[in-house]
Amino acid sequence: ELVIDEIRVAGKSFPVLERLGAKGRAIFRIHDDQAGPRGDYRVLHVLPNSAETAQRIEILRRLTQGNKNFPAVVRYVPERDRVVVIFEWAWGKKLEAMLEGIRAGTTPRFSVFETVKRMRPLAHGLGYYHRETNLVHGDVKPANVIVTERPHHFVLIDFGSAWPVERTTRRDRGDGETLPYAAPELLDSRRAADFRADIFSHAVMMYELLTNQIPYGGMGGAAVRYRSAPPLEPASMLSPDQVRLPASLWRRIDRFLTTALSLDPDGRFPDRGAWLKAIDEIDIEIRQRPRMSAWNEMVVGWVTRFFGKRKSTR
């Protein structure tokens, strides 16, 4: 690949292959020739040297060890005026690109079972992250989620927007403002934000995977800015799998998303435990449902396609 720069860390030079950082953040894709027999990619972050940075990285280092939802910290080098942190490279495809392919019809969509199977561990990873670090990720979105190749996991990357919960009103301008995935409170730097902001962003992605649409008529969290914003349409009414699941399961999914996607953070789940319990219950019910016969699958598929065509012609 084309080497665009070079970074020297603790006497070793790393070729820079791509700049990943935005909003002034120094984040790079590098190659480490000592990572395995033929080397491997790594993600290198350059951060200011401070006690707060050291404490945060130490927590992240412990948090990411053995956790499939986060890339592991493989090296941490404090220097005079900066700290260099090197993360594992998550091999796979960005969820953002997969969603674009699904909309274009070039990538198979995720079924309800596949969506819950991947979003539930990501929720637990975020819950663990909140509990252990007292930090808000602040930028949960498909561009920051890697779908690993085998086995398939959702790996959350880029902790550049993370901030301590106690200081959520002192965010840098632009942090967490990625529309339409940002929670409403993140779009106003004067408002406090906590773990419920990440719950909202997680739910926008889950809603999109289930329906191929963004909630609130495509506005997401920005819907709070408009009096005429459309209401939240239940995912069950938009999903291509509408008739494949029992109504009781869809009611549980709709309740979960309606709560998680409340434009008012006080209307969301009151704590992490309630949020994780709700998505666990969806997962349990989905796994316990009886499997359809091949004939029933064929009939349901025909009905789904027929009603899908009728909706598209309205």
Image: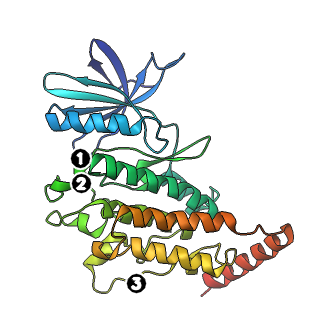
Decide if residue 160 is on the left or right side of residue 117.
left
When the figure is inspected, residue 120 is found, relative to residue 15, above or below; the finding is: below
Question: Tag 2: Cα neighbours inside 10 Å, few (<14), some, or many (≥20)?
Answer: some
- The residue pinned by badge 2 equals 175
Q: Name the element at disc 2.
A: loop
Q: Name the residue: 26% across, 50% down.
A: 134
Q: CA distance from mark 3 to mark 2?
A: 26 Å
- The residue pinned by badge 3 equals 231
* Residue kind at label 3, given as amino acid type: Pro
Contact, CB < 8 Å: mark 1 with mark 2? yes
In x, y percent, where is residue 47? 21, 34
Task: Name the one closer to the observer, 254 or 281.
Answer: 281
Tell me which numbered mark, 1 or 2, is placed earlier along the sequence: 1
Q: Name the residue: 54% across, 76% down.
A: 252
Q: CA distance from mark 3 to mark 1?
A: 32 Å
Question: Tag 3: Cα neighbours inside 10 Å, few (<14), some, or many (≥20)?
Answer: few
When the figure is inspected, residue 71 is found, relative to residue 249, above or below; the finding is: above
**Which mark identifies residue 58?**
none
Task: Name the one closer to the observer, 308 or 244.
Answer: 244
